[in-house]
Image: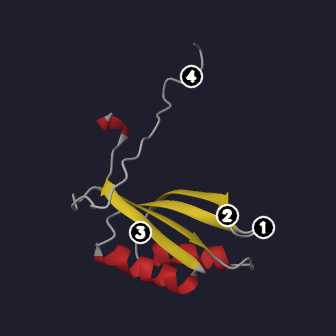
Amino acid sequence: EHIEDNPNNRTRFLVLGFNEPAKTGRDKTSVMFNVHNRPGELVKALKAFNDNGVNLTTIESRPAPRATFEYMFYADCDGHRHDDNMKTALEELKALAMEAVVLGSYPRRDPADI
């Protein structure tokens, strides 16, 4: 009781599977990546999205599981991994990053949809 004090908070749940949903035209893509710990490396990685017109809606850092003082970045982007601009952005990211993994694409849910 009285755990939630903000009526606008929302909890997201994930359904994981091997089959990716079809493109809807209102999609999001989730990506995890890490870059070398040097000045400007994160900016270069983010520039891959900017240069290709891909909007980042979320970016978070998490400690990397295999190395002390290294971080993985989690990002949500507007668009589907098979959209031309997203494919180019992800190719550029993979060329710059130490590691980059596309977690998947899925239909976007807006707050008005809830």
- The mark lying in front, picked from 4 and 3, is 4
Per the model, the C-alpha gap separating discs 2 and 3 is 28 Å
The quadrant where residue 98 appears: bottom right
Tell me which amino acid carries mark 1. Answer: Thr
* Mark 2 residue element: loop
For the view shown, which residue lies furthest in the top direction? Answer: 1
Is label 4 in contact with label 1 (beta carbons under 8 Å)?
A: no
Per the model, the C-alpha gap separating discs 2 and 1 is 8 Å
Q: How far from the left and from the top, in percent, is residue 20? A: 28, 61
- The mark lying in front, picked from 4 and 1, is 1
Per the model, the C-alpha gap separating discs 2 and 4 is 31 Å
- The mark lying in front, picked from 1 and 3, is 1
Tell me which amino acid carries mark 2. Answer: Pro
Near mark 4 (Cα within 10 A), the count class, few <14, some 14-19 or many ≥20, is few
Is label 2 in contact with label 3 (beta carbons under 8 Å)?
A: no
Tell me which amino acid carries mark 3. Answer: Val
Of the image marks 4 and 1, the number of the one nearer the N terminus: 4
Q: How far from the left and from the top, in percent, is residue 91? A: 43, 83
Q: Which residue is mark 2?
A: 65
Tag count: 4
Of the image marks 2 and 3, the number of the one nearer the N terminus: 3
Of the image marks 4 and 3, the number of the one nearer the N terminus: 4
* Mark 1 residue element: loop
Q: How far from the left and from the top, in percent, is residue 28? A: 36, 58
Identify which residue is drawn at 74% across, 80% down: 38
Q: Which residue is mark 4?
A: 4
Identify which residue is drawn at 37% across, 52% down: 16
Q: Which residue is mark 1?
A: 68
The quadrant where residue 66 appears: bottom right
Per the model, the C-alpha gap separating discs 4 and 1 is 34 Å
For the view shown, which residue lies furthest in the right direction? Answer: 69
Q: Which residue is mark 3?
A: 54
